[in-house]
Amino acid sequence: MSQAQALAAAQSLAAHLQRRGIRVSIELQPGVAGSGWYSSTTRVAEMSHHTVSRRSQGNTPVLALVKRGRPDVPGPLCNGYMGFDEVYRIITVGWANHPGAGGPLTVAGRTIPKNNARPYVWGTEYEGGLVVADFTPSYRSAMARANAAILEWLGRPVEAHIEHATWAPGRKVDRLGYTAAAGQAEIRAAQLATLPPHVKEPVMAGPVRLNLNGAIHFVDVATGTFVHIPNPEYNTALGEGLGGRLVEVNQRQFDVIGDFCARVRAQHAAFNSTDRSKVDQVYEWTKGMHPNVQTRLPLVHTAVEAIGAAVAKLDELDVEPVVAALVPAVVDALASRSGITVEQVRAAAEQAVRTVLRDGVDATA
Ligand SMILES: [Zn+2]
């Protein structure tokens, strides 16, 4: 396929991104594995990665690497890339070496085949991943708006957003702190953010009543509550009891808020479980919605910060003592269960540990 087709596709994506307030730079190069400038394969999902970098390294510390690739993995290592400057670079409309082994995975009714996501998934590398605080509110918003734009360009629903960790759990952790549900929640919040401030602010602040041409609804986005209020007496009582505002909305605003609440209810239902980790996932997801919600969940916030701090420390560790501590354990575990020699296992273990610690860049297959 031609370079002209690739440019047209990139310009189409750029228009979607710009509509969501994202600055774009088109820096096209051919894809990997002979896919050329343009892949006509239908992409069914969008995947977010982090590059394993920190803000102190500058705006675009890993941009050159994701274009060029590594000695063992040719570039491009992603279809798109965003620096800390919040500029989205469109790098290839062909295939990129971003997902690696994983799957199979079904998202929003379409299955991505096992170990073969490149033709079917648009991959974005976002700078960061070492320090939670490096994902500032502004940067989180930019990532969510970019992902919303990519899904709109692909013609896919929000559920078609996944994280690298969704595709390769156990092997990958990116993006830092995000589950697929958390990423999707921020995309929905970005969509909700298109509402005008006089509607958005009260809706996100807590329970509120909506007035659409005299039909009143009680709404709480934190729980997904969306209930018609059948008579004026109930309306008055709720207003006096809860103090929430009565907001005039038009049909489009009413529909967006109603859809958002339906999705919130679906998320809560999906995680309706006694499994504590799943409950925490819901909290993690809802905390992205509004500061009022966050303040109710201080424990979650603390946990996320602690994980970020622990990961950040990896960078400051001296590699040699870590190798010395980890390798014997790996050697023992593997050598006792296989026919290969201890020396072979030791060499492989050392290589693996050094790669993780020194070249922690996630942008690999
Ligand atoms: Zn990744």
Image: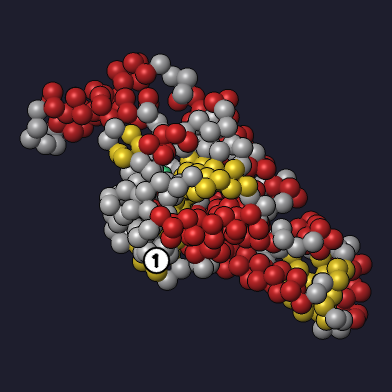
Where's residue 175, x and y in %? 49, 44
Quadrant of the picture in which ligand 1 is shown: top left
- Number of callouts in the render? 1
Q: Quadrant of residue 87?
A: top right
Q: Between residue 110 and residue 291, name the one nearer to us.
A: 110
In this rendered view, identify the residue nearer to me: 77 or 191. Answer: 77
Compared to residue 240, the image places residue 292 above or below, namely above
x and y, in percent, of residue 272 in the image: 54, 63
Is 268 placed left or right of 203 in the picture?
Answer: left
What residue is drawn where x is 32% and y is 48%?
Answer: 32
Up-down: is 338 above or below 326? below
Residue 271: in sight, yes or no? no
Q: Residue at x 72, y 51 (%)?
A: 290
Residue drawn at (85%, 81%) of the image = 213
Q: Mark 1, residues whose alpha carbon is within 10 Å: few (<14), some, or many (≥20)? A: few
As drawn, 217 above or below 349: below
| Quarter of the figure with the N terminus | bottom left
Circle 1 sits on which residue?
42
The residue located at (51%, 68%) in the rendering is: 155
Give the image location of residue 142, x and y in percent.
63, 47
Left/right placement of residue 291 relative to residue 244 reads left
The structure's colour scheme is secondary structure
User: Disc 1 residue type?
Assistant: Thr
